[in-house]
Amino acid sequence: MSVQAEPRTAVTVRIADTGESYKCHTDESLLTGMHRMGKRGIPVGCRGGGCSVCKVWVVAGDYAQIRAMSREYVSEEDLAHGRVLACCVAPRGEVELAVIGKLNKVVTR
Amino acid sequence: MAVTGVLRPGHAQIRVLNLEEDVKFYRDVFGLVEQGRDAQGRVYFKAWDERDHNSVILRQADTAGIDFFGFKVDSVATLNKLEADLNAYGVKTERVPAGEMLATGERVRFEVPTGHVIELYAEKKDVGNGLGYSNPAPWNKQSETGFAPTRMDHALLGGGDLDGARDIFINVLGFYLTEEVVAEDGKTQIAVWLSCSNKTHDIAFVRAPENGKLHHVSYWIETWEKVLRAADLMSMNDVPVDIGPTRHGITRGATIYAFDRSGNRFETFSGGYISYPDMHVLTWPIQHLPEGLDYAQRKLHESFLTVFS
Ligand code: FES
Ligand SMILES: [Fe+2]
């Protein structure tokens, strides 16, 4: 006899910039869902809400915040407009997002 | 030459987004020893083999990153002299009274041109590593808990005016340059490794788009095998890994870069070589940064120059 684990729900996340989409569970962050299966699109950094490279604009769909985000990179206005760190929010249903975080650097090769 | 003047990195105060989550991480997964809390709510840790009271301080904040990085100097006389030297060099200093940090004496605090707050202090309470000062055992239970680094070893800090920060460390504080990454012009330094001891680096700077940034705080692990054990523990505990396990070409350390629960990068590393101030600087042209960072895989990790807290 085995105890059945509660089934996880997976939803589709679309990255508007590339048209690519991936499956993300509703109990993991938008970034984890993408990164886990080797998909690309959102830059992957600290995965702890501290560096901002994963910043996205959720253009459609619902999400829940699952981690604290550094306020250095996410203002009240950002929050009000769905501009969040992809490593800190989980989808509640299908989501479409645009990538706004960038890999800034002083030197380019 | 004996190690005099600035002795070693002594403390790093790190901002975390969820204090209790990171306390659990640094204590139970990392294996640092919790040393107490102060009236401001800051939580103090030390690595198991460190003898001074604390080396890592966590502060709850709404941003990640580093508040300040401190060095221990050999005496109060040296502290006073270095403060006068800094002032003569044009660096403003301020004094933080003894006791502002637990078990820590008066600190001299100043800002370097990369926007980082650096501190010097001469006194921090010797609490020992628990093994005693007579006929000590080589290790204890704490040395087998978590990653169990023996010490907080160095930091890599990011900011714009790398040259200005480097000059203060070399010209005033007695550090010397061990290794550098230089841009295609063959001159502009992209990153510098600076030592005040026989270590390959006690502090390092990388040119970054924003000032005051933390690249990583690094912790010394005794062997490569224990670095691999730390890699297992990272995976077992869902710790986001950035690079490694691998070997840096730069400084030849065996390393893992990973992140704490608030997105502050840390390094667990071992190895490298013994350095002396008379040794020729080792130069890494920027096109060799891939192997400088990751000698095993020789691939460019974009995150090295872009991900900071
Ligand atoms: S990856 Fe650093 S904030 Fe999301
Ligand atoms: Fe390092």
Image: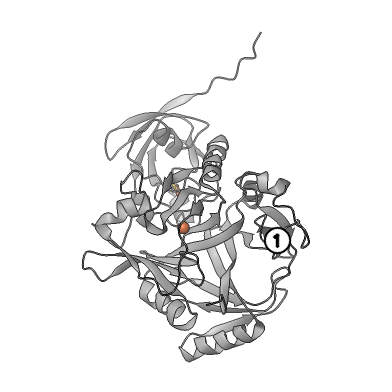
Residue drawn where x is 32% and y is 40% of the image: A41
Q: Nearer the viewer, residue A53 or B256?
A: B256
Residue, x 34% and y 45% (percent of image)?
A: A99
Residue nearest the viewer, comparing A62 with B166: B166
x, y percent for residue B178: 40, 68
Q: Which residue is mark 1?
A: B41
Q: Check the image and name the residue furthest to the top.
A: A1
Residue at disc 1, secondary structure: loop
Determine whether, in the image, residue B194 is placed left or right of residue B39: left
In the displayed image of the protein, which residue is found farthest to the front? Answer: B135
Q: Amino acid at mark 1?
A: Gly
Q: Quadrant of residue B98?
A: bottom right
B295 relative position to B96: left or right:
left
Tell which subunit mark 1 falls on. Answer: B
| Position in image of residue B28 (x %, y %) | 66, 45
Left or right of A69: which side holds B29?
Answer: right
Asked whether residue B57 is in view, the answer is yes
In the rendered view of the protein, which quadrant contains the N terminus of chain A? top right
